[in-house]
Amino acid sequence: MKRNTKIATAVGAGALAVGGLLAVGPVAAGTDTPPAPGSTLQQHMMTGRQHHARQHSDGMHDTRRQGGCTRYTVLAPQGTLTGAQKATLARMAEEEKLAHDLYTSFADRYDVRIFDRIAAAETNHLTAVRTLLNRYDVTDPTTGKGTGDFRDPAVRATYDRLLHQGDRSLSAALKAGRTVEADDITALRHALTGLTAPDARQVYGNLLAASQMHLEMFEHGMSGP
């Protein structure tokens, strides 16, 4: 039986300021804890790739086949974003929603677990992006938007195109997923260029690691058992 993965509600309730850092309930990973007194933030932060590697260290082969992913805790302090960087942040929210909505649709159509699991991961990713939207007082473009509904017409067109592609066959759906993740990797690398805000760099780094891992999962699925 398939079930739709619902996008997490906007950040607000459940957000708790701890020692000047923001820990958000829906984003928090059970393995992450705030820095202990006397320690540095750097000692307790890991790169996105390290974070994913640790979360997927058990049963990596099965995880790549089925699409599992991790959650995040936004521990880094707030910095400063330019107007262009705020616009990029809003775009990131729509891109995470696009991935979620697309994979949820494919999960309902095809009896494979990878889409359902990565759709759940995209819910966590959107929650992390919403944490940044909340911190930097940027309007969330995904608020009140239903499945496949986007503020940016270009995002909507991309969603419709990939949805139509993926409806043809499982192989086509996996290729659509690969396209989404490859495009996200390019966008995230560009977004990290010149970005100084520690919390935004942390979230984007985690999202980049996730997209790289999801890309590997889709390519593994396309290659067969």
Image (tube, rainbow, N blue to C red):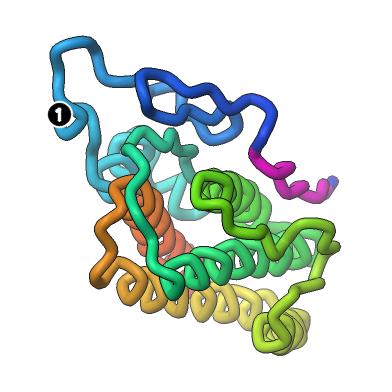
The residue sitting at 15% across, 18% down in the picture is 39
Left or right: where 77 falls relative to 222: left
Secondary structure character of the magenta stretch overall: loop
Residue 104 location (% of width, % of height) = 74, 59
Depth check: 164 or 139 in front? 139
Depth check: 197 or 149 in front? 197
The residue sitting at 58% across, 58% down in the picture is 138
Q: Circle 1 — which element?
A: helix
Numbered label tally: 1
Residue 31 location (% of width, % of height) = 38, 23
Left or right: where 168 falls relative to 60: right
Left or right: where 71 falls relative to 213: right
Depth check: 54 or 110 in front? 54
Say above or below: 76 vs 183: above
The residue sitting at 41% across, 37% down in the picture is 74
What residue would you read off at disc 1? 43
Classify 10 Å Cα crowding around label 1: few (below 14), some (14-19), many (20 and above): few
Residue range in magenta is 2-11
> Looking at the rendering, which quadrant does residue 9 occupy?
top right
> Looking at the rendering, which quadrant does residue 96 occupy?
bottom right
Say above or below: 77 vs 80: above
Which amino acid does the dot numbered 1 rest on? Gln
Decide if residue 103 is in sight here. Answer: no
Decide if residue 34 is in sight here. Answer: yes
Q: Is residue 212 magenta?
A: no
Residue 166 location (% of width, % of height) = 70, 80
The residue sitting at 30% across, 66% down in the picture is 192
